[in-house]
Image (cartoon, grey):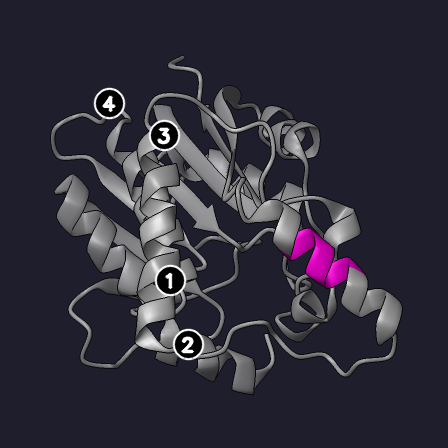
Amino acid sequence: MEAHEYDTMARCERTYWWYRAQRGMVLDELSRIDLPDGATGLDIGCGTGVFVGEVASRLRIGVSGVDVQASWKESSELDLRRASANDLPFDDRSFDLAYSVDVLCCREVDPRRSCREMARVLKPGGFALIAVPAYQWMLSVHDEAVHCVRRFDKKSASSLMTEAGLVVTRSTHLFPSFFPLIAAFRLARRAIHPSTAPTSDIRPLPHPINEALFGWCQLERRLLRHFGFPFGTTQLTIARKPPT
């Protein structure tokens, strides 16, 4: 990710509607996984470490995090390490849960290798979750700015898990109601300004607008607890490592 875009994300991730909504939806999915007492988790591509703390608090488990950019504060009490998603610095069978959010899409990541690493560090019976941008045809200047070079559909995301030796247990999209608007905007911008310099879509919004968008996402979040969505801007896949 470009340095200035990473700084924008770090400034906005606690308040911007999209980040808050996505973290909430992923947290809901993680909280429904049946983890053993004393379970441990791993956040692959943890960024500033904000989500690591939220997962540890919500699930009441120990969570470690890795990221190549190491942008967390040195004083952080969390177990955060600088490492690549392609080469995790942990022994085999170390964790009951491993997850990555908007990581496998990145230029620097080999998605197949990363999923194999995820499976390697999972204990037998452990769970993996990936959340990735949906649909390759939606690649845009926003993606280029944040070093996103690939997007996924249900089949390609599930294949990554199965090829790594995991068994898919859930597959759904997120943000279905925003999908038509975002897709139309990106396709129109591509047609009208095909040579636009790479820049992300993340911009601070007036508080009432930001909260209204977040509130709408909460409706989607409640629905997601009961069934999956067949389309959306994000693809989420959960898989389990065979118990034996």
> Could you tell me which quadrant the N terminus lies in?
bottom right
At label 4, counting other C-alpha atoms closer than 10 Å, the crowd grade (few under 14, some 14-19, many 20 or more) is few
Q: Under tag 2, what secondary structure?
A: loop
Calculate the distance from the C-alpha at mark 3 to the C-alpha at mark 2.
Answer: 26 Å
Q: Amino acid at mark 1?
A: Trp
Calculate the distance from the C-alpha at mark 2 to the C-alpha at mark 4.
Answer: 37 Å
At label 1, counting other C-alpha atoms closer than 10 Å, the crowd grade (few under 14, some 14-19, many 20 or more) is many
Q: Residue drawn at (43%, 34%), measured in percent from left and top?
A: 128
- Reply above or below: 16 against 110: below
The reply, left or right, for residue 163 in relation to residue 213 is right
Calculate the distance from the C-alpha at mark 1 to the C-alpha at mark 4.
Answer: 28 Å
The residue where tag 2 is placed is 205
Q: Are marks 1 and 2 in contact (CB under 8 Å)?
A: yes
Q: Under tag 3, what secondary structure?
A: helix
Q: Amino acid at mark 2?
A: Leu
Q: Give, as a single range, the part of the protein colored magenta.
A: 182-187
Q: Is residue 99 highlighted in magenta?
A: no
The residue where tag 3 is placed is 223
Q: Residue drawn at (28%, 65%), measured in percent from left and top?
A: 50
Please tell me whether mark 4 or mark 3 is closer to you in this view. 3
Q: Is residue 186 highlighted in magenta?
A: yes
Q: Under tag 4, what secondary structure?
A: loop
Calculate the distance from the C-alpha at mark 1 to the C-alpha at mark 2.
Answer: 9 Å
The residue where tag 1 is placed is 17
Q: Main secondary structure of the magenta part?
A: helix
